[in-house]
Image (cartoon, rainbow, N blue to C red):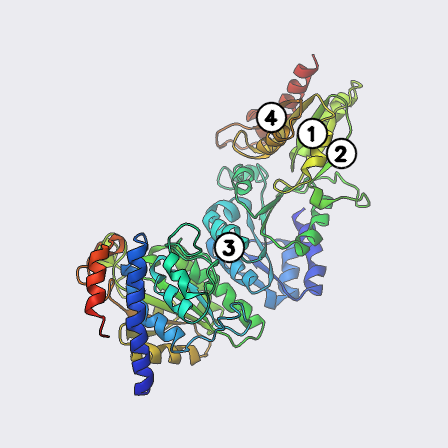
Amino acid sequence: MRDVFLQELIPHMERHENIFFLSADFGSPVLDTIREKFPGRFINVGIAEQNLINVAAGLALEGFTVYAYAIAPFITMRCYEQIRVNLGILSQVRPLNVNLVGVGAGFSYVVSGPTHQCLEDLSIMRSLPNLELFSPADWVCTKKFVGFSVNKTCPKYIRLDAKPLAAIYDENTPMDIAAGFFELKKGKDVCVISTGYMTHKALAVWEVFREKNIDIGVIDLFMLKTLAADGLAGIIGRYAYVITIEEGFIGKGGLDSLVLHLINDKGLEVKVEHLGLADTYNFQVGERDFLHERNNAGQKQLINHIEAFLK
Amino acid sequence: MDKKKEAYLKQKITWVWKETLRIHKRSQETRLASSLSPIEIFVALFYGKILDFDPGDQYWEGRDRLIVSKGHGSIAMYPILADLGFFAKEELQNVGQSGSFMGGIPDPVIPGYETVNGSLGHGLGVSCGIAVALKRKKSRSSVFCMVGDGELYEGSNWEALMFAPFHRLDNLNLVLDCNKISMLDYTDRILSHYSLTEKFGAFRWEVFEVDGHDVTAVYDELRRMKQKREGTPKILIAHTLKGKGVPGLEGEPLSHIMTLEPGKIDRLLGDKNDQ
């Protein structure tokens, strides 16, 4: 996902002389290519995320499009106030195209513990005005987002997984990135709305019910700020029960809040429930799905909730 | 500097000082003491034409970029910007009033201000980004960044102080309004900076130092600093007095948060009426 993003950016950097790439001393094999190909437009600011954001803002004020790259919890929380002041507030007056590329969504750094796991970002980044939030589930969606990010002038937070994830989308499937969601499975009565890694879990649960001849719907939601709200409401309105699942803390303004607010705002008559991570940090090393089960956001819990509704 | 220019700058200093007091009289929430220490610097930058700017086209590509990181302490810039035509002078009557675009802390909705100010420690890093961008564009424009010494406690400054010399940002000019007082006390009694000259030197900045209230010297040093492009970022440490020219405020450890009652301002302005 990360490497596809960087690889896809290369032709844009070749075409557009005004794209800068900044890293807070965080790399990848593809990034080595970017460093070699564009030495005048690549800067490693060192392990200094506050300066990463401020330098990015300065470049963007002068009309450059900037990609700033670091580990997800550090590019959001270490420098949150720099993002708020020099991207969120400033971009309301002066146009800025700064793309914060954070690697390590949710528990994706499974063995690195609570400092490297990123469970707060969906809610805290969603609370900033003027900033868009992209949370893809696979490399195909990620790849399609790159061109969109070059052309859409605003600050953005791009939440990428640290681990390679299987493709969900077909490269040839037309996708409207600006719409912000994709109905992966049409179902009856029950719909799961998920983002990022959890969309893989939702599809696994779809398979479980398919074997029982029950069709549930699955919506992958990847733009967590501006999206086609009416279109999404139209789909949600077809269901009797919606359950959201996210790899982030629950009840704090993330995907759950977005969907619940939309349902209330549009006056939809649908029962809605949410799954997300329990309000605690995790020190135990374990498989990612095990950590989800342990923190109340696993496949088992998702199946149990749906079965309870269907009873 | 010839005598005529010196007299002109001194006349502007007195006028800006008085206008700053008048703004504070109408809008008591404005930070007065920290706005009085950098007046000579702002006057030299704007009226001395150290800066290239165009009031009719605030984002003119050829302008020098001035980033005012010590936002609260730049109320003295309001009358200067109005006088030079960035916006109507009548607007000065409305500072801090409902509906005005000018509050106690200036933001980029005010023509002449480039960035969001008020939260400290942001300006220098943003200035570094602008300086890199100008180099990439092969622009001859300079970046000036105005910080306070209390502001230097913010760690983000030191990330930027490491960045600028390594990237040879010799188009970057940092101006330190070194008034020695932070919010609650003298910096030496809160957390001493010890020798800033040594610190900046150790970070490989070229250090200039000046009496910040000697406008001729300030002008000369700013000009010298701006012209110097030898692969090194530059800092001018301007030694100033917080609350300059106001008895009871000047040198007072708590001056940052002190307001001056309107009657006292009238008396002060009366004393200077003949100037």
Residue B232 seen in the figure:
yes
Q: Position of residue A246 (x, y in %)?
A: 61, 32
Disc 3 crowd, CA 10 A, few/some/many (<14, 14-19, 20+): many
Question: Between tags 1 and 4, which lies in front?
Answer: 4
Disc assigned to residue A274: 4
Residue position marked by numbered label 1 in the rendering: A202
To which quarter of the image does residue A183 belong? top right
Residue position marked by numbered label 2 in the rendering: A184
Residues beneath discs 4 and 3 located on the same chain: yes
Question: Between tags 4 and 3, which lies in front?
Answer: 3
To which quarter of the image does residue B124 belong? bottom left
Residues beneath discs 1 and 4 located on the same chain: yes
Q: Quadrant of the C terminus of chain A?
A: top right
Mark found first going from the N terminus, 4 or 2: 2
Q: Chain of mark 3?
A: A
Mark found first going from the N terminus, 1 or 3: 3
Question: Between tags 1 and 3, which lies in front?
Answer: 3
Residue position marked by numbered label 3 in the rendering: A90
Disc 1 residue type (three-letter): Ala
Q: Residue at x 38, y 64 (%)?
A: B78
